[in-house]
Image (cartoon, rainbow, N blue to C red):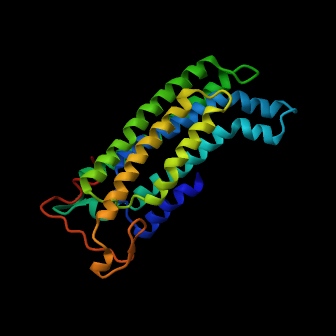
Amino acid sequence: MLVSYLPQIIKFIQKKTSEGLSLYFFFLGSIGMTSTVANMTLLQFPSIVCCAKNNQWGPRLCLENTFGLIQVSVQTFCFMTCVVLFYVYYPVSFKRDVTKPDESTVAWTRARRIAAFIVAYTSLLAIVTLVMLAFTTDSNGYSRPGTYLAGGLGVLATFTSILQFLPQILHTWSEKSVGALSIPMMMMQTPGSLLVVYSLYIQPGANWTSWLPYLICGLLQGCLLTMSVVFTLRKPSSDEEGGTSDPLLGSTQESPVVVEDEPVGQQYGSI
């Protein structure tokens, strides 16, 4: 899971831009993944309690029974790292309006508000989850209110998973270009999503609200991967432009991008 995100992280650092990636892809993904972590924490808390109290459970059995929570937590950490890099490498030219240098563009203002919402939602969700675990669980770690909350978070994660890839799919289709999106990352994550679905399916305490978001993400990511490969292979060879490249990994010499008759920053980060 960690390795699958490395190509995207490396591409951010190499290109030093997040152009070509949809702001709403990261926004919806952040909401969905943090909700899934809270979902798995509430549902698998009895297993965590058993590991802490039951001497008959060895490290191996504890790892097997909490692997789902560990898995989604690691994936969420990697995804949130990409979110941070998206903002770190947000193109400077899209932050300020060329006609009004002292004012931020609409796109950059929207991006900052969404960043604030992500931080606020994640913090509130962490507090609510901790309060639920502290005051509503019995001696074995079970909580009926916690189960209801986990179900609601799972439905929310499923809904955001459906919507998450649509902005990026539409953005990639509109631009007819991959931009800073990493194809190697998607090539690893698309089949990997099916493995995640199976591993969550067999976890004790987990239910359909835990694995369905990953199934939907895998299917939609497969569509995005197919589209990205097609657009990359259709691009003119860099050898004809004076550079060399691997069509799926990027070129060693970038051709200039020309934007005509469109205010800077109007389309970046939007569908």
* Left or right: residue 42 compared with residue 31: right
Q: Nearer the viewer, residue 158 or 137?
A: 158
Q: Is residue 51 above or below residue 83?
A: above
Residue 124 percent coordinates (x, y):
51, 34
Q: Nearer the viewer, residue 57 or 190?
A: 190
Residue 133 percent coordinates (x, y):
65, 27
* Left or right: residue 130 compared with residue 228: right
Q: Is residue 88 above or below residue 25?
A: below
| Residue at the extreme left of the image, as rendered | 261
Q: Is residue 5 above or below residue 191?
A: below
| Residue at the extreme right of the image, as rendered | 55
Residue at image coords 87%, 33%:
55
- In the rendered picture of this protein, how many numbered marks are placed on residues? 0
Residue 115: in sight, yes or no?
no
Residue at image coords 25%, 73%:
256
Residue 135 percent coordinates (x, y):
66, 22
Q: Nearer the viewer, residue 44 or 264?
A: 44
Residue at image coords 49%, 37%:
215
Residue 198 percent coordinates (x, y):
60, 37
| Residue at the extreme bottom of the image, as rendered | 242
Residue at image coords 43%, 67%:
249
Residue 146: in sight, yes or no?
yes
* Left or right: residue 149 compared with residue 28: right
